[in-house]
Amino acid sequence: SSGEDIIAWLADRFQVDTQEARNFVSMLVALGYIYPLQDHRRLVIKPDASLYRFQTPYFWPTQQWPVEDTDYAIYLAKRNIRKRGILELHEQEHYNRLHKWMNHKWDFVVMQAKEQYRAAKERKKPDRVVFECQERAYWVVHRPPPGTVSAMDYGLDRLTDPNADEVTGLLCCSFKHYTPLTRSLCFLCSRRLVKYCSTYKSHDPFLSNCLPSNPWLTDDATYWSLNMPSVEIPTKMRVERWTFSFAELLSDPRGRDDFRLFLKKEFSGENLAFWEGCEDLKWGEAATMREKAEHIYKTFLARGAPRWINIDGKTMEVTVKGLKHPHRYVLDPAQTHIYMLMKKDSYGRYQKSPVFKDTVKKAICPEEHRYRHRRPSLSPIILRQMEQEQRAKMAANVDITQLCRFTTPVPHLAVYSGLTDFPTANASPPLPFLVHTPACPSPISVALESTSASERRVEAGGGEGDGDPAAARAPVGGHVSGSRVALSLRRLLRRGCTSASVFASLSPKCHSAAGTSVRIQPIIPDQPKNTVNTKFVFLEIKCDINQAVNDT
Amino acid sequence: MGKDECKTMLDALNKVTACYRHLVIALGSTSDSQNLREELKRTRKKAQELAVANRTKLTSLLKDKSISKDDRAEYERLWVLFSSSMELLEVDMKRSLEIGQDFPLKVPTRHLIQTGMTGSTTTVAARAMSVQNMKYEADSNIDTADLRDLQCEISQVSQMMEEMEMKVQVAPWAVEAKQEAGAELKSNMSVGNSSVGVISICEEEPKEEDGGGNRDAGFASICAVLVFFVIVTVAVVLGYLVINMS
């Protein structure tokens, strides 16, 4: 029947006006319930005498049967036969694509296509034509030619309905399709997710207010300055995070420092040092890997090593064997062992320790910002200039060069301490420890704690820097540990760079024009006076392997 | 040999599946009728018989560990063919159930869609059943009675397919098809009643047929050119004579 007739009939049947009827019929055509006989590619209703026909129920979209690519391939093959190899361009493309990815089924496709073609041939000619038109119309709806709009477009299928209930509800609806194992895993995962979300919710600056204020909103950078990696007094939120998991504690530089202090008191600092050494090996440069591995071995693993760590025999065996051909991950088993040891043992004690309790007590909780004045923050150019000036000043106060290696010095070794050392060190903090670089925290910092002579060579290149607070802790004539290592180190110190110039000759490969400050801060548990009661004087050398940090 | 037997059975199953699909497409339209329902029923039963036979044969062949690698690859290919046929059959059975339920026949006024088809599908069914003429002997409430049977059969088929997947470990994507793109065009010349012959031709000698086709085409074109020249010569000669005459 013709288009006009259909519209008229529909308008009459449903008692609607012509326009409404036309819209409805055009939808019917677009969805494939009625198809045009001429101009079959465009599924529109034309208000003229062009003819339309009803589609057989098999090809209706009502039942929402999935439209299979296999069927489409069979149809294309059939069409290929009928048209003797001349397909339309988009059909040809589809054909090639399907042949490629459905290749394993292609025999079936060809066989079915031929059989279906023959079966259709059994019918009388007019019926055959109708049949072909029907199928063609179906595929125009479901695989529309390029440039046409398909009424079947409804976007991506979503596995879950976003308007449904919350998490557990969403998971339940697909549960019945899963095996019991998958179901229990899903449940565990979801529970874990929920737990994670509820734990971290108050710490997420998107979800809850961060104190004092979100710097992006108020232009007030207090939040950042309070949460710097090397800040002395951490915020309460930060300290709370350390209690969430051991990984949190270790990943926060400030937390790690706190932990290190605690371990020092317990005299098990070598564990953390070893762990840090392993991290450095894993993430460091490939060129120095071998030396690092050797160094770590000599310091921590070898028999009679100065900071021998306690790992079980099997792991030790494996590690020693692996060290014959060292690579990045050769120390992984040992590292994991030590990590778990720290986690199970030291971490718990740390949380109950006076060190931690002290930190918690001292932790600050900043007030919320009043949103009153929004001053523009310092321009980064100015900040950079300030930084450069600081660095230049510090470069002028080169104190000591220290070699981290027992063997030849590594040229790129940078001994660097952060800019913020100045204020904190001067204030003779109750927790004297070396702070990290503020600019961008180096992911790699090797803290080498070695016992050494209590005396420290303070040699200034260009003259005494008496702005240098470290000089205030000048030679601590404390006890000298009698270990051989200490002696050798002392000898090394004497032998080693005695002037900044030597160090400067080492440095050009790694330092930028800004230069670096070279300083060693002795970590002395007690106040920086001459009496040292404890057995060890720790020298802490921070090496920034990552050169980018040095760049301004 | 086992392989040829398998192939024959598979071809038969393939044929019946194709015919069944054709019949299901006709459901609900004007070519629907009592007869169609009966045809569907019988085709379906035949398809199931073939399916079971195929399955037993193929599983026994595949379970045999002593076959060669090539043989195994071939059987896996046949297995993929078989499972694809079964999938198609299952889908069509489910769809026929739904449409059958939507378009009952035993109602005072049948609401069948005017699709423009007027003829019957007897011939298709005859092809499926491999008989010359179909005999209809079902009773008049076939549409409702049959639907119940259909439901049972669908569940049977689904179960069989699940079992198949469990028992036989064949990775379908690892199978390589023997046909290339456009292979369906090649054996068009020899469309015959014996499907076996056709399949073997197109599997083993597609190139030969292609060459033959080309030769034929060349010959025809040469003939045409010759005839053309003959006609032109005759015309020229006649024209010359006419001019000479006048």
Image (tube, grey):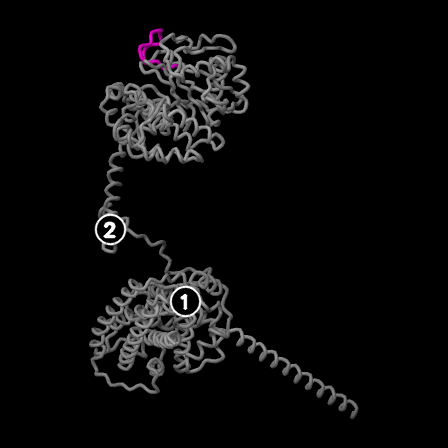
- Marks 2 and 1 in Cβ contact (< 8 Å): no
Residue A517 percent across, percent down from the top left:
47, 17
Question: Is A254 rendered above or below residue A84?
Answer: above
**Chain to which the residue tagged by mark 2 belongs:** A
Q: Classify residue A61 as left or right of residue A545.
A: left
**Pointer 2 residue:** A181
**Pointer 1 residue:** B68
Amino acid type shown at disc 2: Leu
- Predominant SS along the magenta part: loop
Between A431 and A502, the one lying in front of the other is: A502
Question: Regarding mark 1 in the picture, which secondary structure is present there?
Answer: loop
Residue B109 drawn in magenta: no
The CA span between labels 2 and 1 is 38 Å
Q: Is residue B163 visible?
A: yes
**Chain to which the residue tagged by mark 1 belongs:** B
- The residue carrying pointer 2 sits among few (fewer than 14), some (14 to 19) or many (20 or more) residues within 10 Å by Cα, namely few
Q: Which residues are magenta?
A: A522-534
Between A500 and A408, the one lying in front of the other is: A408
Q: Quadrant of the C terminus of chain B?
A: bottom right
Question: Regarding mark 2 in the picture, which secondary structure is present there?
Answer: helix
- The residue carrying pointer 1 sits among few (fewer than 14), some (14 to 19) or many (20 or more) residues within 10 Å by Cα, namely few
Q: For residue B93, which quarter of the picture?
A: bottom left
Between A281 and A479, the one lying in front of the other is: A479
Residue A181 percent across, percent down from the top left:
24, 51
Amino acid type shown at disc 1: Ser
Q: Residue at x 37, y 21 (%)?
A: A306
